[in-house]
Amino acid sequence: MPPSNQLGPLKNQIRRLRFEHGELTQQQLADLIGVTRQTIIALEAGKYAPSLLLAFRLARAFGGTIESVFQYEEPPAAPAPPA
């Protein structure tokens, strides 16, 4: 079962990046990329998976790549059924 604060295998560094980039508030980041503060809250909590366009906007706001903001971790493979 995935951790309750993240969307399955998709993790993000938004909160950490906000603080590394001048301690941006959620509202400032939202204004910068054209979304609501509630969207930033949901993203940080792992309750919302961004569209590709939003992921690019976030990465550009932080001067990085999508992979520097979001990490996808493959879930463990299910065990093979007994033969």
Image: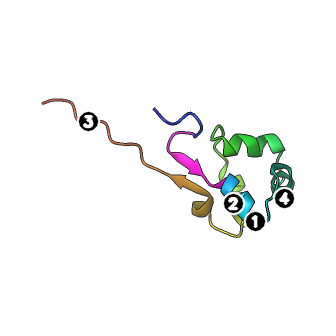
Give the SS element for disc 4: helix
Residue 1 drawn at (x, y percent): 45, 32
Separation of residues labelled 4 and 3 (CA atoms): 45 Å
Residue 3 drawn at (x, y percent): 52, 36
Quarter of the picture holding the C terminus: top left
- Name the residue carrying label 1: 21
- Name the residue carrying label 3: 79
What kind of residue is marked 1? Answer: His
* In the rendered image, the vertical position of residue 11 relative to residue 47, given as above or below: below
Q: Of callouts 1 and 4, which one flags the residue occurring earlier in the amino acid sequence?
A: 1
Is 58 on the left or on the right of 27, as rendered?
left
Q: Of callouts 4 and 3, which one flags the residue occurring earlier in the amino acid sequence?
A: 4
Q: Are marks 1 and 2 in contact (CB under 8 Å)?
A: yes
Separation of residues labelled 1 and 4 (CA atoms): 13 Å
Q: Residue furthest top?
A: 82
Q: Which residue range is magenta in the image?
A: 7-14
What kind of residue is marked 3? Answer: Pro
Separation of residues labelled 2 and 4 (CA atoms): 14 Å
Q: Can you tell which of label 3 and label 1 is closer to the viewer? A: 1
Separation of residues labelled 3 and 1 (CA atoms): 43 Å
What kind of residue is marked 2? Answer: Leu
Q: Where residue 32 is drawn, which disc sits there?
A: 4
Label 2: few (<14), some (14–19) or many (≥20) C-alpha neighbours in 10 Å: some
